[in-house]
Amino acid sequence: MYARRRRKYFLMMGGCIALFVSAWAVVRLWSMPVAIGMCVVAMVIPPVAAVVANRRGPEDRWWDDPSGDPTSDEWWDELDGRKRR
């Protein structure tokens, strides 16, 4: 699951870099407004890529991880009806 999210992140960021480079190396020679539009699209990609990379899927069991606070973990285990070893 982490490899899939990482792959999506790097593909999105690679697309972002490709948009920036192609906009100012090639496209600007034909149309400046299109190059600016490509940069605006590329500007939106990094926040979306960060959300995709940090999103947890239904198979991620983050709620079972101990918090690090023994009192809190013991309290939650008691509520869940299980004991940690």
Image (cartoon, rainbow, N blue to C red):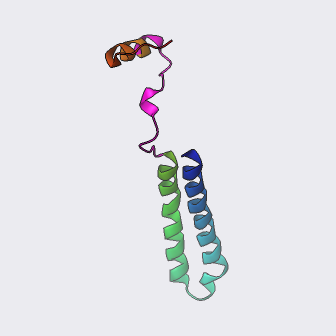
Rendered location of residue 67, percent (x, y): 47, 22
Which residue occupies 60% across, 76% down? 23
Q: Which residues are magenta?
A: 55-72
Q: Is 76 situated above or below 55?
A: above
Q: Nearer the viewer, residue 83 or 41?
A: 83
Q: Nearer the viewer, residue 3 or 34?
A: 3
Q: Is residue 79 left or right of residue 11?
A: left
Rendered location of residue 54, percent (x, y): 50, 45
Is residue 82 highlighted in magenta?
no
Q: Is 27 situated above or below 61?
A: below
Principal SS element in the magenta part? loop
Q: Is residue 37 left or right of residue 28?
A: left
- Please give the count of numbered marks on the rendered protein: 0
Which residue occupies 41% across, 15% down? 72
Rendered location of residue 15, percent (x, y): 59, 67
Residue at the extreme bottom: 30
Dividing the picture into quadrants, the one containing residue 25 is bottom right
Q: Is 14 situated above or below 76?
A: below
Is residue 60 highlighted in magenta?
yes
Rendered location of residue 65, percent (x, y): 48, 26
Q: Nearer the viewer, residue 45 or 58?
A: 58
Which residue occupies 49% across, 69% down? 41
Residue at the extreme right: 25
Which residue occupies 35% across, 13% down? 78
Q: Is 79 situated above or below 47?
A: above
